[in-house]
Amino acid sequence: MRVALCQIEVGDDPKENLRRITDAIAEAAATPGGVDLAVLPEAAQLRFGNDLAAVAEPLDGPFVTALRDAARAHGTAVVAGMFEPADEGRVFNTVVGVGADGELAGSYRKLHLYDAFGDRESAMVAPGDRPVVLDLAGTRIGIVTCYDVRFPELARALVDGGAQVLVIPAAWGQGVFKEEHWTTLVRARAIENTTWVVAVDKAPDRTAPPKGLPGGVGRSQLIDPMGVVLADLGPFPGVRVVELDPDAAARVRKVLPSLEHRRRDVL
């Protein structure tokens, strides 16, 4: 399985952001051998700090339609973050999955909202209400969005629900120790669940957004079920296609059956 980590810049112009998304998908698909799955950041539609409600769209709106067209044109599945309208002027922070045939495989609304480190995501974003596992690129993909990665029970629920790969789109907040938190947490989710992790952050903001703190630390990573980092994109925009062996998790679980050793009678 060939996975593209699409670490793009996300700015204040939705049209420019969509162009960067479709360019990244095209670049990934043009690599020798093509790509099965292209993963883009959380909130790829518009940078946090803007009026999110003004750009929020239903899943049959122009943004998802453009993703579907790009997926179909390039024959690759796509995962990307966007905003859906919610009640009381808020939005849902949504990740959509689109199949290589251009059909919408499903969507996930972020469960845990980033009311931490001086930010208050809940002021503009309504929480989702359920974990989601998608059938994409011939595998079962569990979605974890940014701050969600700090809650290991979500990743475990996704694996229990059949997820073979955890995909983690993010717009990770900048700040002291934040990059270390990101790289540590995404590896931890791979190790403790003996599963693949595809973690894609946006490229770091180089200017302050209209409101709020700068986001994105980069460091998008592909991590194998033993916790080995097979790709790390560093701090700059880029697209990298990496091989993911779906059978590796089963091999690891034969020698490290920690999921089988859980004390369900106690915990």
Image (tube, helix red, strand yellow):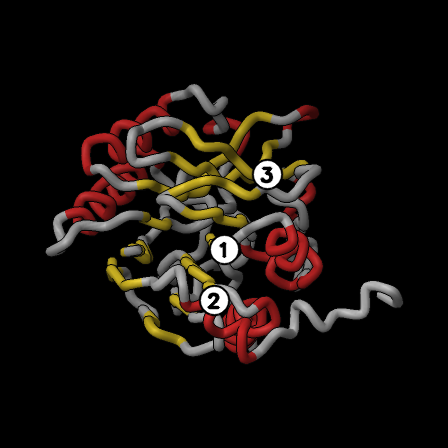
Number of callouts in the render? 3
Is residue 222 rendered to the left or right of residue 85?
left
Q: Position of residue 65 (x, y in %)?
A: 34, 24
Q: Quadrant of the N terminus?
A: bottom left
Q: Is residue 242 left or right of residue 256?
A: left
Of label 3 and label 1, which has the lower sequence position? 3
* Label 3 Cα neighbours within 10 Å, binned few <14 / some 14-19 / many ≥20: many
Say which amino acid is labelled 1: Gln
Q: Quadrant of residue 246?
A: bottom left
Task: In the rendered structure, find residue 164 and report the number of the disc placed on it.
Answer: 1
Say the numbered circle drawn on residue 249: 2
Mark sitting earlier along the chain (1/2): 1
Tell me what residue is drawn at x 53 percent, y 61 percent.
173
Residues at marks 1 and 2 touching, judged by CB atoms closer than 8 Å: yes
Amino acid residing under circle 3:
Arg
Residue 71 visible to an observer of this rendering: yes
Residue 252 in the image, given as x and y percentages of width and height: 49, 74
User: Which residue is at the front of the view, 143 or 54?
Assistant: 143
> Could you tell me the amino acid type at mark 2?
Ala
At 67% from the left edge and 63% from the top edge, which residue is drawn?
A: 152
Q: CA distance from mark 1 to mark 2?
A: 8 Å
Mark 3, residue position: 109
Q: Secondary structure at mark 3?
A: strand
